[in-house]
Amino acid sequence: MTKKIKTIFLMAVSVLCFFYSAPAFAALRVVTTTEDLAALTKEIGGNEVQVETLIRGYQDAHFIAAKPSYMFRLNRADLLIYQGMELEVGWLPLLIQGARNPDVMVGKLGHLNASSVIEPIEIPQILDRSMGDIHPFGNPHYLLDPANGIHVARLIADRLAQLVPDKKDFFQKGLENFTERLNAKILEWGQRMEFLKGLKVTAYHRSWSYLFRRFGIQYAALIEVVPGIPPTPKHLVRVVDAMKTENTKLIIQANYFESKSAKFLATKTGSQILSLPVSVGGVDEVKTYIELFDYIVAHLERKLK
Amino acid sequence: MKVLYILLIIIFSSSSNVWSASEAIQINERIKILEQKIQNTKELEGEIESLKNRLEKFEKKSSNTETQDLNGQFPSYNRTRQPQTFPGAPVTDLGPQDIQNQFPSYNRTPQSQSFERSTATGFSRYFNPAISANGLLLGTYRSEDNANPSAATKTGFKVQEVELQATANVDNYLRANLVTAFEDTSTFEIEEFYVDAVLTRDFSVRLGKSYNNFGKHNFLHQHQFPFIDAPLVNLKIFGDEALNESGIGINYLLPLPWYSELIFNVLEGDNEVLLNGTSNNQFGYLLHAKNLWELSEDTTVEASGSFLFGKNGAGTENNSSFAAGGSLTLKWIPSQKARYQQVEWQTEYIHSERETGVNAGLAAIPNPDEQRAGIYSYLKYQFAQNWWAQGRFDYYGFEKALGEKDQYRLSGLVGFVPSEFSAVRVQYNYLDDKLARDEHQVLLQLNFTMGSHPAHNY
C-alpha cells in the first residue's frame, strides 16, 4: 500500500514538474492584449518570440471580462504589451494582479505600454462621467493610423532587444523590413484614398479618428449618445437631421457593434453601411497589420468609387 | 637647453593647435545645432500659422452650422491645441506633413501641474489612492406586516449601504485596499483592509481583513451581489456579515495546463456563527480550490471547493466547527457580442457542522451537534445592452439546527444597467419559510458608483 502511494505521489510530482518546466524550453513569451499588437510583434520577432493575444480582433476591447484563463496566460509571459490610454482599464489591472507574475508588473521590463510613443488626439477638455466612457489620456484607437504602427513597432523592437540582447540585430532587421513595407503601403493608401478628402461620414463610435485624420475624412455625427452609451430614439432622430444637413451617405462602424441603429439611419437617409474590422483578426481575411489597412482601403473604395 | 626649449615650444604650439582644432569643431557643431533650431523654429512658426488659419476656418464653419453639436459630442474634445514636437518619437512616417503635425501637446503645462498639487502641502496628488463611493438605495414591499422591528426585510425605504473604497500600491512590494461601509447610514464598519504581495511567480500573500474565498458568493461585496439579497444558505451558515475575517492567506497558482488556484488562509476566528471560540489561539483554517476551464472562446466552466475548520464558543468548552462547500459556474459570453448578450448559471451548495459540547450544570449530557445545509442556483441572462433578466432558486434545510424550519425561496429580477456605474434592479421573492403564511417581497434597488471604482472579478 505504502509503495503504491509512493508511486502515485512520484507520478503526480513528475506531471507537475513537466507542466511547470515546459514553458522554459520556449522562445521569449509575449502576451499582447490586442491582435494588432500581436501582429506587430510577430513582424519583428519572427520565430524568436512566441506571441499570444488575449483578445481577438472581432472583440470590443472596451468590454472584456477578466477571465482567469487570461491570468493563466499572463502568468507564463515574459513580456506583456498593451494598448494603453485606458483602453483596457476595465480588465487588464485585474489580470496583472491575478497573474502573480512579477515580470509583467508595472515598472518592470516585461511591462510595455505601447501608447507611450503615441501623440494622442481627442484628449477630453473636461473629465466627467456624464460625458460617458471617455478616455482621459485621449483616443486609444491609435493603431488605426498606420504611421503609429511604425512608432509602436520600434518600441517593441527596442524592448525585445532589451529582453534578448543576443537577437538585437535580428529584431532590427525585422523592424527595418516591416517599416519599409509599411511606409510604401502608407504612400499607396494615401494616394488611393485621396478622393475621400473632405468626406463626411457617420460613425458609431470614435474608433476611426486616427484613420480619418490620415485620409482627411470627417465625422458628420456619431450614433452612440456619448461614448459607451447606446443611442436613444431621440438621439437617432437628431443624427438623421445631422446626416441630412451634412448630406452624408455613409455610415461606418466596427463590426462588433449592433447594426439595428445603423440600418434605421440608412433607411431614413438612404445611406450605405460599412461594417469594418478595427483590428487584425477582425475578419478572417485580415491576418497582418498591413492586411488590415488593405482591407479597409479596398472596402472604402468599393463602397464609394 | 636650447633643444629642450625648442621642444617645449613645439609641444606647446602643437597642443594649442589641437585645442584650437577641438574648439573649432565645437563651435561648428554649436552653429549647426543653432541653425537647425532656427530652421525648426521657422517650420514650427509656419505650422502654427497654417493651423491658426485652419482653426479660423473651422470656427467660422462651426458658427455657421449647429448640426455638429450633437449633445456636445464634438466640442467636448480638445482638438485645437497647438502642435508640439514630440521629443524622442521616431518619425519615419511618409504621410502628409500636415497630418504629422496635428498632434496636440504631449507635455503637461505648468498650469495643469499646479492643479495636480495639494495647495496645503505642495505635494503631488498623483500618488493618492484611487477612491470611489458606492451607494445602494433600497425600497421594499413585504406582504407580512412590519411588526418585527428586527426583521431584515421591512416595507419601506432605506439607504442599504454606502461603501467607500481606496486602492493604491504602497510601494514596489505591496498593494493595499481599504473598504469601509455604512449600513443603514448608522453602522460604520471596516469591511476590508488588506495588503497583497506577489512573493515569487505563482505565489502571492494577503495580510489583513477581507471577505474570504469560501465558495462563490461569500467574497462578494453587497453591491456585487447577483441578486439584491444574499442566498439563504450563506445567511444561515455564516450570518449577516458573511465570512469576513482578519488573517493571512497564501495564494498559489498551480502549474497545470488550466487555471487552477489554491488558497490557504489562517483566520482570526471571529465569525458570529461558526468561529466564535473564546480562546485567543483558536484560529480558523480555510482551504479553497478554484479551477476554470475554457470550453470554447465563449464558454467557461468553473468548479470550486472550500473547506473551513475552526472552534466555536458553544457550551462550556470550545468545540469544533467546520463548513464545506462546492460550486459550479457556467458562463457564456459571445466574443463578438459581449456588450449585448451573456448567460451565467451558478449553483452552490454549503454544509456546516457545529459541535455544541455540554452545558454547565447538565452533567455530561451532550447537546446535539448543529448541522446546516442548503443550496442556491441562479440563471442570469443579458438580453440587450442594458438589460438583464434573472431567476434564482434558494433552499435551506437539507440539514438544520434544532428549532429551525426549512425554507425555500423563488426570486425573479429585472435589471436595467444604463452604464458601468449605475443599475436599477427590481426583484420579486416568493418565500416559503414554513410559517403561517407564505411571504411575497418586492425589492427595488438603485446601485451606483462615484469615482474610480476598479473592475470586478470574473
Image (cartoon, rainbow, N blue to C red):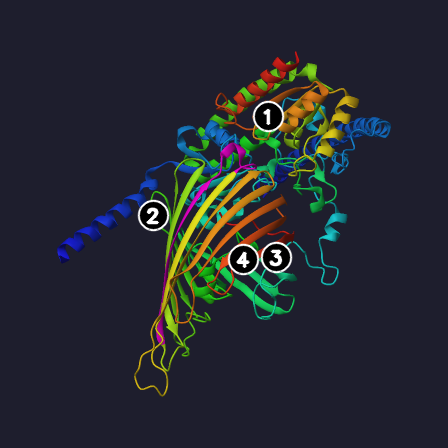
Picture quarter containing residue B288?
A: bottom left
Q: Are marks 3 and 4 on the same chain?
A: yes
**Gap in angstroms between the C-alphas marked 4 and 2:** 37 Å
Name above or below for residue B167 compared with residue B258. Answer: below
Q: Which residue is mark 1?
A: A146
User: Which sits in the foreground, A25 or B240?
Assistant: B240
User: Which sits in the foreground, B113 or B248?
Assistant: B248
**Gap in angstroms between the C-alphas marked 3 and 1:** 36 Å
Host chain of mark 4: B
Picture quarter containing residue A300?
A: top right
Q: Pointers 4 and 1 in contact (CB under 8 A)?
A: no
Q: Earlier in the sequence, mark 3 or mark 4?
A: 3
User: Which sits in the foreground, B343 or B79?
Assistant: B343
**The residue positioned farthest toward the top in the image shown:** A305
Camera-nearest label, 3 or 4: 4
In the visual, does A99 lie left or right of B32? left
Camera-nearest label, 2 or 1: 2
Q: Pointers 3 and 2 in contact (CB under 8 A)?
A: no
Q: Earlier in the sequence, mark 4 or mark 2?
A: 4
